[in-house]
Amino acid sequence: MFIDNQELYTAIYEQTLGGIVTDDAQVRKAVLAAISEATSYLNGKYDCTAIFNATGDNRHPLVLEHCKSMAVWYILRVSNAGVIYEKAKDYYTLAIGWFKEVAGVGASGKELAADLPLKQVDGVVKMPLRAGSNPKFNHSF
């Protein structure tokens, strides 16, 4: 699995997690939901199978951290943890913002995650085609 339960302790204290969840299945569901949501943002451009099947040090560190934040959010939704809830919501919002920026091109026009594997079909990188133009010029006011 992309994230194991022990790794969540870098995003939430073990005793806090233990006070919220009753079994490992709840944690697994939260992790799977986080990975599924991250995949929904990255799937058009990146090879999500390669990203989320990576293990150990081969995992993209920022994707890993953002997925942990998202998993913690899914876990904390069932609690009444007060301040922790607000902090988790903030981290979740930041994670989603990052994934949205990576799915497109960041506001600066630079690739934010140039080291993520791109989606390929038969060895050829598949990129969604984007085209556009400036709005039509109109002299009348």
Image (spheres, grey):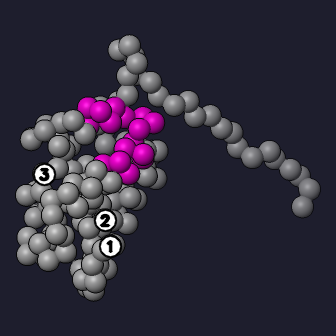
- How many labels were placed on the picture? 3
- Point out the stretch of residues depicted in magenta: 35-51
Query: Which badge, 1 or 3, comes first in the chain's sequence?
Result: 3
Q: Position of residue 44 (x, y in %)?
A: 45, 36
Say which quadrant the C terminus sits in: bottom right
Left or right: where does residue 133 sit relative to residue 17?
A: right
Secondary structure mostly seen in magenta is: helix
Q: Residues within 10 Å of mark 1 (few under 14, many from 20)?
A: few
Q: Are marks 3 and 2 in contact (CB under 8 Å)?
A: no
Q: Position of residue 72 (x, y in %)?
A: 24, 65
In space, the residues marked 3 and 2 are separated at their CA atoms by 15 Å
Q: Which residue is mark 3?
A: 4
Query: Which badge, 3 or 2, comes first in the chain's sequence?
Result: 3
Instruction: Please tell me which residue is depicted at 21% across the width and 35% down the height of the picture.
Output: 53
Amino acid marked by disc 3: Asp
Q: Which residue is mark 1?
A: 77
Left or right: where does residue 7 sit relative to residue 112?
A: left
